[in-house]
Amino acid sequence: MSARFDLGFEQLPPAIPIFPLTGVLLLPRGRLPLNIFEPRYLAMVSDALPWPRLIGMLQPQEGRGDAGEPPVYPVGCAGRVIYWSETEDGRYIIQLVGTARFRIAAELPMQRGYRLARPDWSPYRGDLAAPPAEAGLDRERLLRALKPFLKRHNIEIDWAAAAKAPDDALVTMVAMGSPFQPSEKQALLEAGTLGERARLLTALLEMAGAPAATEPTGVRH
C-alpha cells in the first residue's frame, strides 16, 4: 500500500515513535526502505500508520549498538511512511521519506515495547520548505572525490543520473548511501544548511580517499 500527504509545521505531532538504528541516515526529502521484523517495531509501524505516519529515525550513540534501549544522539529525522506492505511471514516492508529533523526534548513512557519521544521541531522548521535551487555545491569537486571512494567500497551508481540530479538530491543521495562512520553520518544530519552539508560531504569523501594515495606498495588489508 502507499500513501502521500504533506504536513505543515503546525501539524507536526507533539510525540513520535523513535527507531534507533546504527549507521542509518535519513535526511529531509531522502527515501529510506526498511524491513521490519522485530515485534516491538512491528507494533510501532502498525501504530504509526493511521496518522500522521511519522517515525523518528535516530542513531544510538557510537558503540552502543541497537539492542535494548541504548542512549541515542539528540538529533534525528522524522520520516513519513509513503509505502508499506505485509509479507506472508509477518514482516512489514516500508519506505520512509524524510520530513523534518528534530531534537529530542524528552523521552516518554514506552508503548508496546517501542520508544516514544517529545520532539522539538522548532530548530528545523526550514526542513519543510522547498530546497534551494543551488546549494553552493562544487559538483565537479564532489564527483571527483566520490569516484575513488565508491570504487574503494565496491559501490556502483548511475553516473548519468547523478550528473543530472539537482544539488539537494545529489547531496542527499550520496550522504545517505555512503558507508561513513556513525559519527560522520550524524554530523551530516546536523549540518545547518544544505550548503554546509555539501561542503562537509565533500570533505569526508576527500579524507576517505586520501589514505589510498599514500598507502605503501605491498600493504594489504
Image (tube, helix red, strand yellow):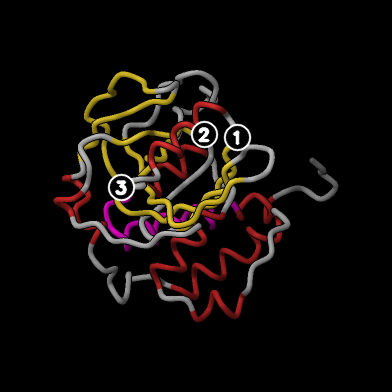
**SS at mark 2 in the image:** helix
Mark identifier at residue 42:
2
Left or right, 128 with respect to 151, comes to left
Identity of the residue furthest to the right in this view: 218
Tag 1 near tag 2, CB within 8 Å: yes
**SS at mark 3 in the image:** loop
Tag 3 near tag 1, CB within 8 Å: no
Disc 1 packing (10 Å; few <14; some 14–19; many ≥20): some
Which residue is rendered at x = 38% and y = 67% of the image?
168
Range of residues picked out in magenta: 191-208
Which residue is rendered at x = 45% and y = 19% of the image?
69
Mark identifier at residue 37:
1
Left or right, 39 with respect to 154, comes to left
What's the CA distance linking mark 1 and mark 2? Answer: 6 Å
* Quadrant containing the C terminus in the rendered view: top right
Q: Nearer the viewer, residue 60 or 40?
A: 40
Q: Earlier in the sequence, mark 2 or mark 3?
A: 2
**Which amino acid type corresponds to the residue marked 2 in the rendered image?**
Leu
**Which amino acid type corresponds to the residue marked 3 in the rendered image?**
Pro
Residue annotated with mark 3: 52
Which residue is rendered at x = 37% and y = 57% of the image?
197
Left or right, 46 with respect to 212, comes to left
